[in-house]
Amino acid sequence: LENDVNDLGTALEHANAANAESQKNIKIIQLRLREVQARFEEENRAKSIAQDNLIAADRRCNANQNSLEEGRTLLEQSDRNRRMIEQELADTNETLSDQTCQNQAISGTKAKCEQEINSLGHDLDEMMGEAQMSEEKAQRAM
């Protein structure tokens, strides 16, 4: 019986040591579990922040895409306006060229008319002089 008590005492000591070791391991495991839970929560927060950043980046991307489309539309409109103004300029230059040619023709005709008027004036003066001489001769002859 004493042997059994000693065996039971030894078994109890071993059981108590194993229990202490198990308690120690449980505390280590609980500590690791808390660390893993903390990392998990941190990762969830980081994931949430990353999702928020992704949503914000998507919004900025969409806004930039809209701005790009608006810029392209404005560029196309300004290109059409530029081509229209270039055509108007070409038409205006052609009209200016035509009017310059007409102006030169009119100036040439004006100069010719002035020359003829001067010539006719000179001829008129000559004829007036001849008419006076003829009248003087006619009066003398009478």
Image (spheres, rainbow, N blue to C red):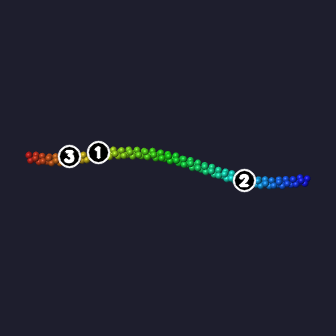
Q: Nearer the viewer, mark 1 or mark 2?
A: 2
Residue 72: where, in percent of width, then height? 50, 46
> Between residues 55 and 46, which one lies in front from this camera angle?
46
**Crowdedness near tag 1: few (<14), some (14–19) or many (≥20) residues, C-alpha within 10 Å:** few
| Residue located beneath label 3 in the image | 120
Mark number, residue 114: none
| Residue located beneath label 2 in the image | 32
For image coordinates 39% across by 46% down, the residue present is: 89
> Between residues 118 and 40, which one lies in front from this camera angle?
40
Q: How many marks?
A: 3
Q: What whole-number distance in Å separates the C-alpha atoms at marks 2 and 3?
A: 126 Å
**Crowdedness near tag 3: few (<14), some (14–19) or many (≥20) residues, C-alpha within 10 Å:** few
For image coordinates 58% across by 48% down, the residue present is: 58
Q: What whole-number distance in Å separates the C-alpha atoms at marks 1 and 3?
A: 22 Å
Q: Which quadrant would residue 21 be assigned to in this image?
A: bottom right
2 or 3: tag closer to the N-terminus: 2
Contact? badges 1 and 2 (CB < 8 Å): no
Residue 122: where, in percent of width, then height? 19, 48
Q: Nearer the viewer, mark 1 or mark 3?
A: 1
**Crowdedness near tag 2: few (<14), some (14–19) or many (≥20) residues, C-alpha within 10 Å:** few
Residue 61: where, in percent of width, then height? 56, 48
Q: Amino acid at mark 2?
A: Arg
Q: Secondary structure at mark 1?
A: helix
Q: Secondary structure at mark 3?
A: helix
For image coordinates 46% across by 47% down, the residue present is: 78
| Residue located beneath label 1 in the image | 105
Q: Amino acid at mark 1?
A: Ala
Contact? badges 2 and 3 (CB < 8 Å): no
Residue 82 located left or right of residue 68: left
